[in-house]
């Protein structure tokens, strides 16, 4: 059975990394005090030093502009998706016009056939509400 990995809270990591930064004890002493590997303490220390400047940064106008442009882009995508959804509903309405004869064969409503535009003559003709091959 595999040994489960230890997970440490963010507060504990901060506490250990801060002690390592203060320099009151060596990393070897901290690793024996907290029963951690020295590399782990070094990694937490580096991470704290690297990310600590983010505490004092203020959201600037550039961030706000980025957020607004992203929001505008998302609204445009929503609009495109709604138009696609409307097109699909029109398609489903035209599909509903297809009827079936007594033998279960599909027939097509005359109005639907009139609305179709063909770029070349179709290889089928409408005969008795069914498409027949020419």
Image (cartoon, helix red, strand yellow):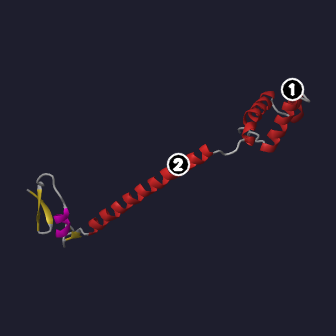
Residue 9 position, x and y percent, is: 78, 44
Asked whether residue 77 is drawn in magenta, I would say no
Q: Tell which circle, 1 or 2, labels the residue nearer the N-terminal end.
A: 1
Q: Secondary structure at mark 2?
A: helix
Spot the residue most to the front: 61
Q: Residue at x 48, y 50 (%)?
A: 73
Q: Is residue 62 above or below residue 84?
A: above
Q: Residue at x 52, y 48 (%)?
A: 69
Q: Which mark is residue 28?
A: 1
Q: Residue at x 30, y 67 (%)?
A: 93
Residue 98 in sight in this render: yes
Counting from the top left corner in percent of width and height, residue 82 is at 41, 60
Is there any visible trace of residue 109 in the rendered image?
no
Q: Which residue is mark 2?
A: 70
The residue depicted at 77 percent of the width and 35 percent of the height is: 48
Quarter holding the C terminus is bottom left
| In the rendered image, the vertical position of residue 53 relative to residue 80, given as above or below | above
State how many labels appear. Answer: 2
Classify residue 66 by image quadrant. top right
Q: Quadrant location of the N terminus?
A: top right
Q: Main secondary structure of the magenta part?
A: helix
The magenta span reads 110-115
The 10 Å Cα crowd at callout 2, few under 14, some 14 to 19, many 20 or more, is few
Residue closest to the eye, 93 or 72: 72
Instruction: Determine the CA span between mark 1 and mark 2.
Output: 48 Å
User: Is residue 56 left or right of 111 when viewed as pictured?
Assistant: right
Most extreme residue toward the right is 24
**Residue 122 lies in what quarter of the image?**
bottom left
């Amino acid at each position: 059975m595999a040994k489960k990995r230890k997970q440490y809270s963010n507060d504990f990591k901060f506490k250990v990394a801060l002690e390592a930064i203060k320099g009151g004890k060596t990393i070897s002493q901290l690793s024996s005090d907290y029963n951690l590997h020295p590399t782990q303490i070094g990694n937490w220390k580096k991470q704290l030093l690297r990310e600590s400047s983010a505490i004092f940064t203020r959201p600037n106008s550039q961030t706000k502009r980025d957020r607004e442009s992203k929001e505008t882009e998302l609204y445009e995508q929503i609009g495109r998706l709604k138009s696609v959804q409307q097109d699909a509903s029109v398609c489903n309405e035209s599909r509903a016009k297809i009827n079936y004869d007594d033998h279960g064969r599909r027939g097509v409503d005359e109005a639907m056939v009139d609305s179709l535009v063909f770029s070349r003559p179709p290889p089928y003709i409408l005969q008795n509400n069914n498409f027949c091959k020419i």
